[in-house]
Amino acid sequence: MPSYTVTVATGSQWFAGTDDYVYLSLEGTAGCSERHLLDKPFYNDFERGAVDSYDVTVEEDLGEIQLIKIEKRKYWYQDDWYLKYVTVKTPMGDYLEFPCYRWITDEKEVVLRDGRAKLPRDDKTQILKQHRRKELETRQKTYRWKEWHPGFPLSIDAHSHSELPRDIQFDNEKGIDFILNYSKAMENLYVNRFMHMFQSSWSDFADFERIFVRISNTISEYVMQHWKEDFMFGYQFLNGCNPVLIRRCTEIPKKLPVTTDMVECSLERNLTLEEEVKQGNIFIVDYELLDGVDANKTDPCTIQYLAAPICLLYKNLENKIVPIAIQLGQKPGPGNPIFLPSDATYDWLLAKIWVRSSDFHIHQTVTHLLRTHLVSEVFSIAMFRQLPAVHPLFKLLVPHMRFTIAINTKAREQLICECGLFDKANATGGGGHVQMVQKAMKDLTYGSLCFPEEIKAKGMDSKEDIPYYYYRDDGIKVWEAIKNFAEDVIHIYYESDEVVCEDVELQAFVKDIYVYGMRGVKASGFPKTIKTREKLAEYLTVIIFTTSAQHAAVNFGQYDWCSWIPNAPPTMRCPPPTEKGTVTIEQIVESLPDRGRSCWHLGAVWALSQFQDNELFLGTYPDEHFVEKPVKEAMAKFRKDLDEIVNTITERNKNKKLPYYYLSPDRIPNSVAV
């Protein structure tokens, strides 16, 4: 009688094994096997990290194996089991791989197809078509869209992490408990003695070192030493943790009535301000989005303030970007002066501090939360709803969706919810952050997520004109590597543009993102359909780049750039100055966050800057969803390209006082998971 050798691999996560009854059956083109008992209580099979083999004998040959069914029946208590994969050796000596990489919970049956990726058109038999359809029907009932706030991209329909499907939960929920992690961070940073000292001001700038000195590192310590200097202020617009706002100024806006006479002492080329603009030497950062946003009112004992500044910057003869004019409000007038480097020292310093505080708010809520976390969740939900596990694009994208829905759900549960941790230290807490996302949605376009296109649209693409923009340089290298990889995979499965058009699952995936993620807004520029392989490659690059590189660029530098509180104040406790010549050092210190808010802020940026314990970096795919040799060769080429980028960045950073490494592929996690 024919005999099949079945090998079953259990995950290595904690509690991945099971003591339940486990049954297996095979289904082929010529028939089905009986249900075979593989494990029962106390057999010690399916232990954590184990690979177990069994012989399954059948009465007659089953033909080509199409499906295998794994069934788990409870012995005593709920005992979830993480099944990595099953391999089957046929009587003819052929090996078939059946990837799973899922939790089997309760008393459920899991039906697996072999690991060869298939488009809908490739399924010829009714049994395979039915399996594909049933998988998506089940997923669409499990992964449901929900509106968290009006105008937001839709998110997962779950109130808490524990309500999520087991497959997308964190392995260890304690590891991403924000309250626990923030408390632990403040303990590790030796600042917990200050954390309840709200309304208690620091005595001077040096006093901030009491919560800083123990945890200094190369960049954060350099920031502490040089934060007052104009070159450091300007440098952060290029290579800090929010390097996405600066744009070349093509015309001085009427709402910023700055003249050549005002800034003449800052201009080094003997040109007028208008001539400097024409030569491309003037840059601008406008925080208009903050105008009208309500400041945090959750603490009646502390009035908090926001501003919507406009900052004009200049490329000097050393090619450094430095500030030359700052207006702290959007409407010009006597009570809204334009601050200049030639003003009194503390006037100019406080104006820069206000810009840095505004930059922090835009960074946290728009650059980080909306444009990486919430957008990545949209990609993730749409993938689970519209792409079955056998689809090549599911196999390509699933590593880049790891834990994204989970981290966002946990954030909505503890961090950015009403009365959450975000409210404790941030001036945009208490609802301001919600207003900001709603306003920022109009600028969330498909083109703005295409990295090279967005850099060019801002006039920041010339390496000759702007030589020290490492975020741009490294980002374009990583973008190209991802795009080349996506193209390689696409050409394996899509032989023509016609095949792209015919892929109904791909089109449903794209439509889900447009309709639910972008709320069907035509102005977003998100495609409703994709008709060419070239456009598909770009679309997949947007998804993978956003979930990996873009998030890394704006997340993991938070401790480096924001731990020195005066450089990134999360709140301001006095209103912006309305006249010049009145600012004192005491007024600046009173404006900065109190001791309690400073400590909560420090704990937050430290916790958010840490990699996960089991982090997987770009190009690392330990879960073998793909089994075909051409795709594995494409993956190897992708890793080689990424390694070359790592080497280039490492070489450039040698001996730099301010190394830029946030877009080095060995520091880019595959997905948004923190």
Image (cartoon, rainbow, N blue to C red):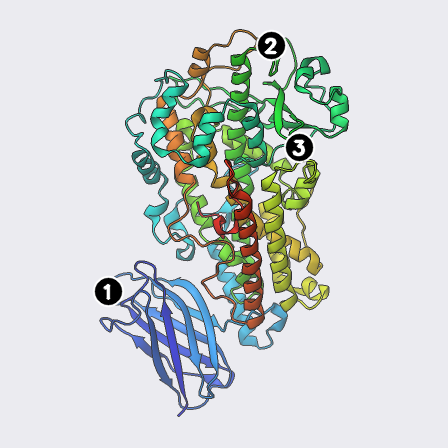
- Which residue is label 3 attached to? 247
Q: Amino acid at mark 1?
A: Trp
Horizontal placement of 362 versus 526: left or right?
A: left
| 326 or 10: nearer the viewer | 326
Q: Position of residue 85 (x, y in %)?
A: 42, 69
The quarter in which the N terminus is drawn is bottom left
Quadrant hosting residue 414: top left
Q: Nearer the viewer, mark 1 or mark 3?
A: 3
| 256 or 667: nearer the viewer | 667
Q: Earlier in the sequence, mark 2 or mark 1?
A: 1
Q: CA distance from mark 2 to mark 1?
A: 73 Å
Q: In terms of secondary structure, where does tag 1 sit?
A: loop
- Whether 610 is drawn above or below 54: the answer is above
Q: Amino acid at mark 3?
A: Arg
The reply to whether discs 2 and 1 touch (Cβ–Cβ < 8 Å) is no
Q: Earlier in the sequence, mark 1 or mark 3?
A: 1
Q: Residue furthest bottom?
A: 1
Horizontal placement of 195 versus 379: left or right?
A: left
Q: Amino acid at mark 2?
A: Gly
- Which residue is label 1 attached to? 76
Q: Position of residue 598 (x, y in %)?
A: 39, 26
Q: CA distance from mark 2 to mark 3?
A: 27 Å
Residue 335, numbered circle: 2
Q: Residue at x 61, y 48 (%)?
A: 515
- Whether 550 is drawn above or below 15: the answer is above
Q: Residue furthest left?
A: 42
Q: Residues within 10 Å of mark 3 (few under 14, many from 20)?
A: some
Q: Residues within 10 Å of mark 1 (few under 14, many from 20)?
A: few
| 86 or 103: nearer the viewer | 86
Q: Position of residue 82 (x, y in %)?
A: 36, 63
Q: CA distance from mark 1 to mark 3?
A: 63 Å
